[in-house]
Image: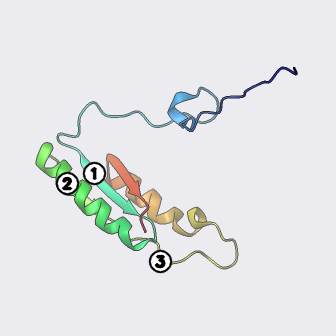
Amino acid sequence: MASLSLTMLSPLPVYLDETTAGIPLAPRPETLNGRVVALLPNWRPSAVEILQAVGGLLAGRYRLKGLVLEQPARELPQRTGGLIDAIRGQLDDLAKRADVVITATGD
């Protein structure tokens, strides 16, 4: 009888903060108390609803300094197709106004 081999694949992704290679992620605050939290939806319709629910839960749990819901990106740019390029200015502005940014996608 021929021997069989089995390869196990994990369904779990490797998150960026679990690796040491590449650009490090920004430091995480120990608490959200006294912080401005920004909610950044993508262009999917349910993303706003998801983030509104998350924002409500965070506001009930922490003493937030502020809670900001950004406007979602409405469309991908036709020339480059790069969403980040299209909203780079918005992201730079948001980074100046918020201590923490939470994003979501939803359908």
Q: Position of residue 70 (x, y in %)?
A: 34, 66
Q: Which of 20 and 49 lies nearest the eye of the viewer?
A: 49
Q: Residue furthest front?
A: 1
Residue at point 51%, 67% (across, down): 87
The answer to which quarter of the image holds residue 97 is bottom left
Choose the circle earlier in sequence order: 2 or 1: 1
Who's the residue at 53% across and 29% down the image? Answer: 18
- Looking at the rendered structure, the kind of residue marked 3 is Arg
Question: Mark 3 or 1, which is nearer the eye?
Answer: 3
Q: CA distance from mark 3 to mark 2?
A: 24 Å
At 58% from the left and 74% from the top, the residue drawn is 76
Q: Position of residue 86 (x, y in %)?
A: 56, 69
Q: On residue 66, which mark appears?
A: 2
**Residue 65 in view of the camera:** no
Which circle's residue, 3 or 1, is located before the other in the chain?
1
Disc assigned to residue 74: 3
- Cα separation between marks 3 and 1: 22 Å
Q: Amino acid at mark 1?
A: Val
Q: Which kind of residue does numbered mark 2 sit on?
A: Gly
Q: Which label belongs to residue 37?
A: 1
Dots 3, 2 in contact, CB < 8 A: no
Left/right placement of residue 35 relative to residue 38 reads left
Crowding near the residue tagged with mark 2, few <14, some 14–19, many ≥20 C-alpha atoms within 10 Å: some
Question: Answer yes or no: do the residues labelled 2 and 1 have beta carbons within 8 Å?
Answer: yes
